Image: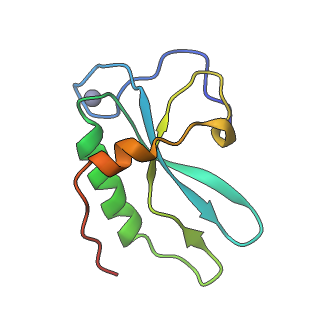
Amino acid sequence: MPMPPYPLHCYRKGCGQLAIYKIAARWSDGVTSELKTYALSCEACLPEWFRLSRQKQAACRLTTAETLEPPGIYRMERGQRDKKLERLSEREAELPAIEVST
Ligand SMILES: [Zn+2]
């Protein structure tokens, strides 16, 4: 899905800042794949959303055919399709490591 052409805001209630990051994970059922969006975030809320998204991903139940990668941080670009979003691996590395038990 292309991003809508209007500004999007941080998912955190009461934040009100424009979202500049998208936290999303690559999901696949072995046939199709898509980016599953966990949150849109401003700069300030990013560490919290990233942590929550990783927790949600770890708790997600999958069928044997499904795969769901740990959520990553993408730069939001209006009008840009998900597949072309730039992944910000450096921002992910800066954030505190998350202990995930499976
Ligand atoms: Zn925010």
Q: Quadrant of ligand 1?
A: top left
Q: Residue at x 45, y 62 (%)?
A: 70
Q: Position of residue 98 (x, y in %)?
A: 25, 63
Q: Is residue 15 above or below residue 70?
A: above
In this view, the residue in front, 64 or 13, is 64
Q: Position of residue 50 (x, y in %)?
A: 32, 48
Screen quadrant of the N terminus = top right
Q: Position of residue 97 (x, y in %)?
A: 25, 60
Picture quadrant of residue 53: bottom left
Q: Is residue 66 above or below residue 96?
A: below
Q: Position of residue 29 (x, y in %)?
A: 68, 70
Residue found at the far top of this picture: 6
How many numbered discs sit on the rendered protein?
0
Q: Residue at x 59, y 50 (%)?
A: 35
Q: Residue at x 72, y 72 (%)?
A: 30
Residue 26 left/right relative to 44: right
Residue 93 left/right relative to 63: left
Picture quadrant of residue 80: top right
